[in-house]
Amino acid sequence: MKTVITALVSIPFLVIQLAAAVSIDCEHIRVDNKKFDISKLAGPHSVILHDTSRPPAEYNTTWSLNICAPLKKSEDIPDADQCPSGTRVCGVVRSWNPADDPEQKHVEVENVIPVAGNFDASTGSSLDPQVSRLKAQDSKADGLQIELNGGYYNKKKQRAIIQLQCDKERTGNDDEERRRKRDDTEDDKEQTPSNSSLTFVSYGPVEGKEAIEVVRFNWRTKYACEDYADSDEARKTGWGLFTWFILLAFLGIAAYLIFGSWLNYNRYGARGWDLLPHGDTIRDLPYLVRDFSKKVVDTVSGGGSRGGYSAV
């Protein structure tokens, strides 16, 4: 019986370990006793590559990625024209003829490339994230390398390698912020590899025993710096010990009042103020606070009095 109970108790821990093995916790990353928090990079990010080398048509490839959660599917786009559910890194190739369609009203989707994600329900492949420090490759480098797997396209396994490079002047989200503020297409020309935080490096096959294609990105951000997690800025953005204490105290008091009220209602049939545990004390609390405050004020302001006697 004890063995069965032990097995049942261990199931939740096994589930948690399994979930961690197929996903990535962006807020709590620890590599070689170094901690990183890249949760501020969560959300969809994209890089658009233009290709005019095959006239008369023009092509562009939109590489989209979310390293912290699956990309959300768009309801107004057919499923065949976007990556399946669970995708973290996706490439979509589109084409149009600028001579016949200068305003790009009839853009066709040529290829959809699910590079990385959890596809256990479809292909049985998982994200299998691998995180390492850039110092493992170059002692002078500062940052992280994240490797994501799971995709399968054109009879080849897919993989994404994202190098998060330390740049203390960048959040890594400036490209998306610039895109949201853009009012016309002229700004799109300003987003060049020299001033973009997230840049496309390459996509293609790699040499090895198995057929695999790899897409590579570089991403400059201060959240990849090894000393950022211990910086004053990181501490200010996080919840301090005092904040957690206040939150836990509030939750504890709320739970006590709710449970006490339920107990008084079911056991004694109490109503109104009688429902609350120590209801009389709570009801008199404003008066107690008022009397205490008055006493403090009188003590401070009456420090120079002499026992209530006045000079004659």
Image (tube, rainbow, N blue to C red):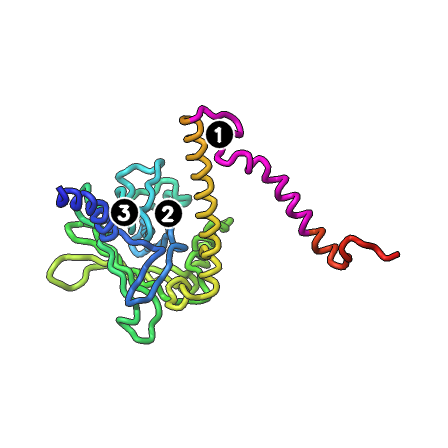
x and y percentages locating residue 203 in the rendered image: 25, 59
Q: Are marks 3 and 2 in contact (CB under 8 Å)?
A: no
Tag 2 residue: 98
Mark 1 or mark 3: whose residue is earlier in sequence? 3
Nearer the camera: disc 1 or disc 2: 1
Looking at the picture, tell me which residue is in the foreground, 18 or 191. 18
Residue at the outermost right position: 312
Q: Residues within 10 Å of mark 1 (few under 14, many from 20)?
A: many
Q: Which residues are magenta?
A: 268-296
Looking at the picture, tell me which residue is in the foreground, 77 or 309. 309
Indicate whether residue 279 is drawn in magenta: yes
Q: Name the residue: 33% across, 75% down.
A: 140
Disc number for residue 275: 1
Tag 3 residue: 87
x and y percentages locating residue 284 in the rendered image: 59, 37
Spatial distance from mark 3 to mark 2, Cα to Cα?
A: 31 Å
- What secondary structure is the magenta-colored segment mainly? helix
Question: Residue flagged by tag 2: what amino acid is it?
Answer: Pro
The picture quadrant where one finds residue 38 is bottom left
Q: Is residue 49 left or right of residue 282?
A: left
Q: Are marks 1 and 2 in contact (CB under 8 Å)?
A: no
